[in-house]
Image (cartoon, grey):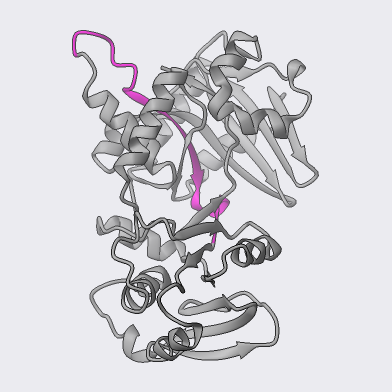
Amino acid sequence: MLIRPFRAVLPNMKFVASPKAFFSSVREKYPDYKKGNFFKKAAKEAIYVLQIERNGEMHEGIVTCAHIDEFVSQRIKKHENTISVKEQQQIDLILKRGAGVKPVLVFHKEVKKISDWIKDIITRKRLLEIKFNAKEIHRIWTVTDAEEIEHICKLFKKHIPEGYIADGHHRCASTALMSANHNEEEVNPYEYLMTSFFPSTHLKIYDFNRIVNALQDISPVNFIVQLSEHCDISVLDKYRKPKEKFEIIMYLGKEWYCLKWKKKLLRSKKNILLDANLMNKYILNDILGFEDIRTDTRIKYLEGVKTIESFKNQCNKIDKGIGFILYPVDIRDLIEIADQKKIMPPKSTWFEPRMKNGIIVQEF
């Protein structure tokens, strides 16, 4: 894996009274904040070590720049298709800001030599510590020594032949498009893309759930009858999470149901079966008549880190809504799908931890 240091732009924390409010607005307001001296350019090129403490757990990786060819050639592998409208939105944001305010999140196999190097760095004096709440703290260390930078770059080149995108498919696609179309007579500002690398053992996959506005043309009773052809359905006394793959919890008419796919649907030997794929085919397409899952505005996606009360409230706002809570995707399934150059359904995974916008910025 070809990585390199970069001269980042960093927040001036003396001017930040509320980290949560400030960093949540950086995505849109970065140019104004830069003019107001809320950000300053680092004196030297560096590679950064990142530690995110979340709910008492430590997640450690590095923030650096990866060559755009690593994404284009799929040595950093994708598992989702991108949508052209969202690519255009990303391009517009990049041009407006002249910067990327959040690294692409990539995971890789754990390498002891790299983990040991990170552990050594975090024994030193920190550059930044940003506390968002009692349960989430971001800590940053900077590495500017030429020998140390050369050492970690060599470790990545030798031991990390491939990586997998966890978050940032559209940022990758947009930057690759801008890189491919730059003026060849000028320096390519999009040749390297800010990327955070974490070993897979330091990331968690959460469920990515669906709220569907779909009962305009079918009654709840008829929907349940048709659903019973594909699932074994049982009524629950109260909410619980799915216990395993191929089990979905459904919220309909303020009642909870457990859905288990019938065994006849699980006999595929060619493809890895995912709950999201099965749901798209047998529920959204066959029963509800959705034609293009990727673009249908009747589907709302809610990440599994949100509370169940938030999920219920979102469902109850829709008069004819149905909520579906899925079991988290197994990381081994994701890796196998990406290795086979196949694609998962949109919004299949939600990875944590995620670095906040604006903590480290790459200007183009």
Q: Quadrant of the C terminus?
A: top left
Residue 361 lies, with reference to residue 242, above or below; the image says above
Residue 32 is at least partly visible in this image:
yes
Q: Is residue 186 magenta?
A: yes
Residue 97 lies, with reference to residue 277, above or below; the image says above
| Residue 40 quadrant | top right
Instruction: Using residue 21 as the reference point, say whether residue 101 is left or right of it.
Output: left
Residue 27 lies, with reference to residue 104, above or below; the image says above
Query: Residue drawn 50% across and 47% down?
Result: 199
**Rendered location of residue 215, percent (x, y):** 46, 74
**Rendered location of residue 16, percent (x, y):** 74, 22
Query: Residue drawn 69% across and 16% down?
Result: 12
Q: Of residues 98 and 52, which is closer to you in this image?
A: 98
Q: Of residues 95 and 2, which is closer to you in this image?
A: 95
Extreme front residue here? 216
**Rendered location of residue 105, percent (x, y):** 47, 41
Instruction: Using residue 35 as the reference point, say whether residue 276 is left or right of it.
Output: left
| Residue 157 quadrant | top left
Q: Of residues 112 and 66, which is closer to you in this image?
A: 66
Q: How many numbered circles does the render carry?
A: 0
Query: Residue drawn 72% across and 24% down?
Result: 125
Residue 99 lies, with reference to residue 111, above or below; the image says above
Instruction: Using residue 7 as the reference point, say whether residue 37 is left or right of it.
Output: right
**Rendered location of residue 219, percent (x, y):** 47, 82
State the extent of the magenta-drawn residues as a range: 184-206
Query: Residue drawn 67% across and 77% down?
Result: 239
Q: Quadrant of the N terminus?
A: top left
Residue 41 is at least partly visible in this image:
no
Q: Is residue 72 magenta?
A: no
